[in-house]
Image: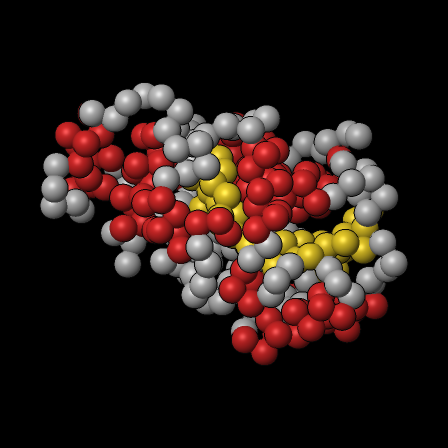
Amino acid sequence: MKLQRFEVESYMTLHENNCRYNLADTVAKSLTLKELLAYDKKDSLEDLMNLSLDYGAIEGSHELKKGILSLYQSGDDEEIAICHGGVNANELVLMTLLSTNDHILSFLPTYQQLYSFPESLGVEVDFIHLKEENEWKIDFEELEKNIRENTKMICLNLPNNPTGTTLDHEEMQQLIQICKKHDLYVLVDEIYRGLYQEESISDLYEKGIATSGLSKVLSTPGLRIGWIKTKDKELIRLINERRDYSIISSGPINDYLGALTLKYSK
Ligand SMILES: Cc1ncc(COP(=O)(O)O)c(C=O)c1O
C-alpha cells in the first residue's frame, strides 16, 4: 500500500536546521550533553567513557525502565518496550496490532502518522473532526456512532498536536467506557504528556497503549529514546519480537543517557 508523504516531517527536514528563528518546533530547548551530565554528582562522564559499545541491554536496561515507570502510577519492566523515539513506538504498535480490513478511528487534525501509517497497512480509517467551535474537544457521541463491526482501535494524541486537546478524568473514563463496551484497543500518543495531560491510558485500561519518549517535555530528542507502555504484557512481548527486525536495541549510550535524563526529570 502507498505511504503518504509525512507533510510536517518533510517540511521540518527542509527548514528546521536552516532558518534564523524556528517557531515551528515542538521541543523545549534541548539539553546539551554537558548540561545533562552536570545534573549528576558522580562522574558520569567516566561511566560513559567506559561503556562497552556493544548492543547494550537489548530490551532496555532496568535503570531506563525504572526511570520511565516513575512517570506512571503503575507498571513493571515487562509492561514497557523501548523504541527509537515516539515515532517508532507508534509504528510498532500499529504494525503489531493492525492488518488489512481492520477499521480504526483517528482524529483530525492530528499527527499524520496516526492515520497515514495505518492506511498504508490497508486499514480503513474514519476520522472524528476536532472543531474550534467545540473548543477542539472530542465528541464522544460521534466517536461511538462511527464504531463498526471491524473497528479494532481508536488512535489519538493527548495533548493533541496541533489542537492541544486533553482529556480530564471524567472524559478519560468516557473514552474507556466506549472502548470497553466495544472491546477496542486505544493507542494514545502521550509524547506531550506532562504538559497539561496528567493521566495515562496505560494506568487505566487493560487494552490501553501509551506511547511516549524523551523528545518533547524532557528536552532530549537527540537520544531517540521512546517507549510503549501497556498492561498487556503479551503485546509487549510481540512488539519486542517485531523490534528485533528493526532497531534491535537503542544502544548503550542512548540507554545510559536516557536513564540519566529521567533520573533528574523531577
Ligand atoms: C504527536 C507526536 N508523536 C510523535 C512524535 C515523534 O516523536 P519522537 O521525536 O520521539 O520520535 C512527534 C514529533 O513531533 C509528535 O508531535
Image position, residue 106 (x, y; %): 71, 54
- Quarter of image, res 64: top left
Q: Residue 242 vs residue 117: left or right?
A: left
Residue at left offset 26%, top offset 37%: 32
- Where is the C terminus found, in terms of image quarters? bottom left
Location of residue 149 in the rendering, given as x and y in whole percent from the top left corner: 88, 58
Question: Looking at the picture, how far across and down is residue 241, in whole percent?
Answer: 59, 34
Q: Residue at x 81, y 55 (%)?
A: 151
Q: Position of residue 218 (x, y in %)?
A: 36, 49
> Is residue 189 at all visible to an observer of this figure?
no
State how the image is colored.
secondary structure
- The answer, for residue 140, to whether it is visible in the render is yes
Q: Residue at x 86, y 60 (%)?
A: 148
Residue 266 lies, with reference to residue 65, above or below; the image says below
Q: Residue furthest top?
A: 53
| Front in this rendered view, residue 21 or 253 | 253
- The quarter of the image holding the N terminus is top right
Q: Is residue 130 left or right of residue 256?
A: right
Looking at the image, residue 150 lies above or below residue 49: below
In the image, 31: left or right of 140?
A: left
In this view, the residue farthest toward the bottom is 170
The mark total stands at 0
Residue lying at 56% horizontally and 29% vertically, measured from the top left:
244
* Vertical side of 180 occupied by 225: above or below: above
Rendered image quadrant of residue 168: bottom right
Of 105 and 254, the residue lying toward us: 254
Of the pair 52 and 98, the residue shown nearer to us: 52
